[in-house]
Amino acid sequence: MDNITLILPAKPEYVSLARLTIASVANNMGFSIEDVEDLKVAVSEACTNALSHSQNENGSYELTYVVDEGSLTFTVSDNGMGFEPDSVMAPQLDGEQVGGFGLFIIKSLMDQVEIVSRRGLGTSIRMVKNRSVCNEV
């Protein structure tokens, strides 16, 4: 098992670094192209949430990747405002609701999602994607 940690400035231009890192790691692990794309979207959404809720524009957030034989686990942690994860409703497609789409997308793309958040202390979103076993002909 390998661990990779990145600490990124809370600036939008560094989200692409998180995307490139997860794509490289997942590709080296043998994830399918579709799964690599799903991972890139999920990490982008999690990083965007960390940026949106950061309390300090000069702050940072942390990404941790855990490479295991059959899965990739990654966590995005910030020191933002925190929130009550159970209070986030599934998005309504009628345009009435604002917010909640990022978490909905993450949950739909990943095999496991765990959100730990404490008011005033920040949020960690832990996501797991299992590598599919493809049978070659």
Image (spheres, rainbow, N blue to C red):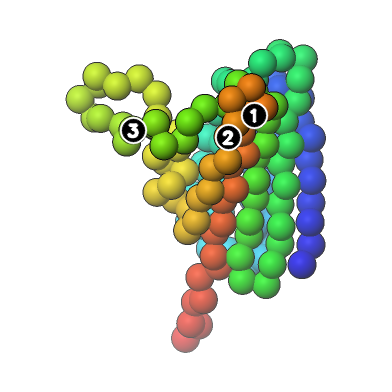
Earlier-in-chain disc, 3 versus 1: 3
Circle 1: residue type: Gly
Task: Kindly identify which residue carries mark 1.
Answer: 122
Work out whether residue 50 can be spotted.
Answer: no
Residue at figure coordinates x 54%, y 42% from the top left: 115
Q: Mark 3 points at which residue?
A: 89
* CB-based contact (under 8 Å), mark 1 and mark 2: yes
Instruction: Name the foreground residue: 116 vs 91.
Output: 116
Residue 137 vs residue 121, the one in the foreground:
121
Q: Distance between the residues labelled 3 and 2?
A: 16 Å
Q: Dot 2: what SS?
A: strand
Question: Which residue carries the number 2 mark?
Answer: 117
- Give the vertical position of 18 relative to 127 (above or below): above
Instruction: Tell me the amino acid under the disc marked 3.
Output: Met
Residue 45 placed where, x, y %?
53, 35
Q: Specify the quadrant of the image occupied by residue 30.
A: bottom right
Q: Which of 34 and 7 is in front in this view?
A: 7
